[in-house]
Structures are given as structure tokens and as C-alpha cells.
């Protein structure tokens, strides 16, 4: 079965989420479609021009057991370390209270292709990606059907 398109309720849910990253010194709050000059300045200070925001929680936008989500997040952390990209903890916090905030990683210096590949590897419908000076962008991930316990 094909993934549902990123439209309707699913697209609305992604757009009605704040993607919070625990960057030093005070963190950042990212919204899809917005520019983030403070984030651009932070990236420039460290020599990066791109970033990604990826979660491993709730693959396929299907609510998943807490322990499974924790294990998936640990696997994502290991995968990002293998890419040799610096990352910081974050969470996707919905504007409404009908979905639990999802543990995520803010990844500095990651290419769009690598961020999408990570999202796909962890069964995500989309990731958020950005480039200095541009809008935060929702990017669809194409992935194989979710397999039980597969990461």
C-alpha cells in the first residue's frame, strides 16, 4: 500500500507543529515555511549552512509504543553519529494536545538527501530541512512499508 500523500490532515499536522531544538545557548523553535535568522546566525558561527530535523518516533505517522519509540530514537542517534554530523536533542511539539511531542534530533550540516534518507530509514512520512537564508521546508520521505520492529 502506498503512503498517503502529504496533504489534508497530515500536512496540517506537520505545519501545526513547533520543532524545538536544544541548541546552545538558548534553543530554537522552528516552524515550517518560516525563516529563522537567529538559527542562520548560529549556523554561520559554526561554519554550517544546512540543517535537518528528524525523528524516529511513530513511523508512518502511526502511534507507537513508548518503549519502541525510545529504542528507535537510540538507533537514530547512532545513525547520525555514523554520519559524523553533530546533533542536538529536540522534539516536535504539536499546537494541539492530541499528539505526544516526538523526541527528535536537530542535525547540523546535513544534506537534504541524507536527511530524507534518514527519515525514510526510520519510516517517516517527512522531515524538516533548511538552508541558511531560506524557509524551513517540509520534505516528503519515500519508504518501504513499515515492518514490525524494523529500523
Image (cartoon, grey):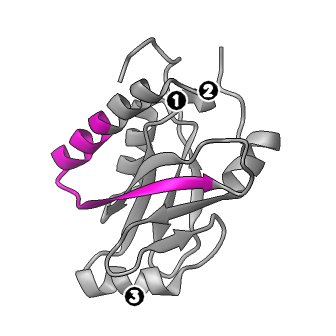
Locate residue 124, reporting x and y percent.
52, 36
- Identify residue for label 3: 41
* Mark sitting on residue 76: none
- Write the residue at 50% across / 64% down: 20
Compare marks 3 and 2 and give the one earlier in the sequence.
3
Q: Nearer the viewer, residue 117 or 42?
A: 42
**CA gap, disc 1 to disc 2?**
6 Å
* Mark sitting on residue 59: 1
| Residue 21 as seen in the image, left or right of residue 45 | right
Q: Secondary structure at mark 1?
A: helix
**CA gap, disc 3 to disc 2?**
36 Å
Label 2 crowding class (10 Å Cα cut-off): few <14, some 14-19, many 20+? few
- Write the residue at 47% across / 86% down: 38
* Mark sitting on residue 62: 2
Locate residue 142, reporting x and y percent.
53, 33
Read off the magenta span. 74-93
Q: Nearer the viewer, residue 97 or 82?
A: 97
Please tell me whether residue 75 belongs to the stretch shown in magenta: yes
Q: Quadrant of the N terminus?
A: top right
Locate residue 41, reporting x and y percent.
39, 88
Residue mark closest to the camera, 3 vs 2: 2
- Marks 3,1: beta carbons within 8 A: no
Q: Nearer the viewer, residue 69 or 115?
A: 69
- Write the residue at 36% across / 83% down: 42
Please tell me whether residue 22 belongs to the stretch shown in magenta: no
| Residue 141 as seen in the image, left or right of residue 50 | right
Q: Secondary structure at mark 3?
A: helix
Label 1 crowding class (10 Å Cα cut-off): few <14, some 14-19, many 20+? many
- Marks 1,2: beta carbons within 8 A: yes
Compare marks 3 and 1 and give the one earlier in the sequence.
3
Amino acid at each position: 500500500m502506498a503512503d498517503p500523500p502529504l496533504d489534508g490532515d497530515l500536512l496540517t499536522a506537520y505545519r501545526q507543529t513547533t520543532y524545538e531544538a536544544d541548541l546552545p545557548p538558548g534553543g530554537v523553535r522552528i516552524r515550517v515555511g518560516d525563516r529563522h535568522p537567529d538559527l542562520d546566525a548560529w549556523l554561520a558561527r559554526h561554519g554550517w549552512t544546512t540543517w535537518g530535523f528528524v525523528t524516529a518516533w511513530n513511523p508512518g505517522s502511526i502511534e507507537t509504543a513508548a518503549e519502541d519509540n525510545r529504542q528507535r530514537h537510540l538507533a537514530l542517534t547512532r545513525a547520525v553519529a555514523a554520519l559524523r554530523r553533530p546533533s542536538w536533542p529536540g522534539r516536535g511539539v504539536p499546537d494541539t494536545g492530541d499528539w505526544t511531542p516526538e523526541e527528535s534530533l536537530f542535525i547540523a550540516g546535513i544534506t537534504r538527501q541524507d536527511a530524507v534518507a534518514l527519515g525514510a530509514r526510520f519510516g517517516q512520512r517527512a522531515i524538516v530541512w533548511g538552508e541558511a537564508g531560506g524557509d524551513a521546508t517540509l520534505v516528503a520521505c519515500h519508504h518501504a512499508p513499515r515492518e514490525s520492529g524494523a529500523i
